Image (cartoon, grey):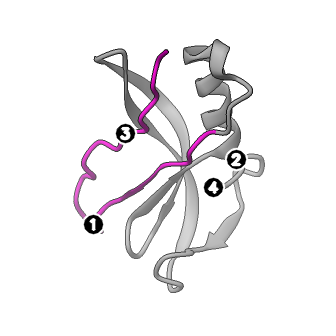
């Protein structure tokens, strides 16, 4: 996962090793208790060559804390979404289980 601190930073893609990961905002989709939750303008890093998308680490932690405060002490799984270059990516999801 990437951190979203410097808006001008570029990082080599960990998937294709050719492209650069650029910071952007995407719509994040997840399911909680059988309901779909969408978060617009969610910080992410997207490769300009292969289209791989990685969500921002701090933003994922904050979202998990908002959606499941009782699970704040549990480690979170990081989700990535792979998109094809030049096409809109299918919505990614990060499974969040409720107790």
Q: Secondary structure at mark 1?
A: loop
Among the two numbered marks 1 and 4 on one chain, the one whose residue lies closer to the N terminus: 4
Side of 19 relative to 4 (left or right): left
**For the stretch drawn in magenta, what is the main secondary structure?**
loop
Q: Secondary structure at mark 3?
A: loop
Q: Residue furthest bottom?
A: 18
Residue under numbered circle 2: 4
Rendered residue at 46%/82% (across/down):
16
Location of residue 61 (image quadrant): top right
Among the two numbered marks 1 and 2 on one chain, the one whose residue lies closer to the N terminus: 2
Task: Reply above or below: 91 against 40.
Answer: below
Q: Residues within 10 Å of mark 2 (few under 14, many from 20)?
A: some
Residue under numbered circle 1: 84
Cα separation between marks 3 and 2: 19 Å
Segment tinted magenta in the rendering: 76-99
Residue under numbered circle 3: 93
Location of residue 91 (image quadrant): top left
Cα separation between marks 1 and 3: 17 Å
Side of 24 relative to 5 (left or right): left
Side of 95 relative to 60 (left or right): left
Rendered residue at 30%/68% (across/down):
85
Side of 99 relative to 58 (left or right): left
Q: Position of residue 18 (x, y in %)?
A: 50, 86
Among the two numbered marks 4 and 3 on one chain, the one whose residue lies closer to the N terminus: 4
Residue under numbered circle 4: 1
């Amino acid at each position: 996962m990437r951190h979203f601190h410097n808006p001008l930073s570029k990082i080599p893609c960990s998937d294709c090793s050719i492209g650069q990961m650029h910071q952007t905002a995407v719509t994040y989709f997840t399911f909680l208790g059988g309901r779909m939750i969408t978060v617009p303008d969610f910080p992410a890093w997207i490769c300009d060559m292969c289209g791989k998308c990685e969500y921002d680490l701090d933003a994922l932690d904050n979202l998990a804390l908002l959606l499941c405060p009782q699970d704040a002490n549990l480690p979170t799984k990081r989700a990535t979404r792979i998109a094809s270059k030049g096409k809109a990516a299918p919505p990614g999801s990060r499974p969040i289980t409720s107790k």
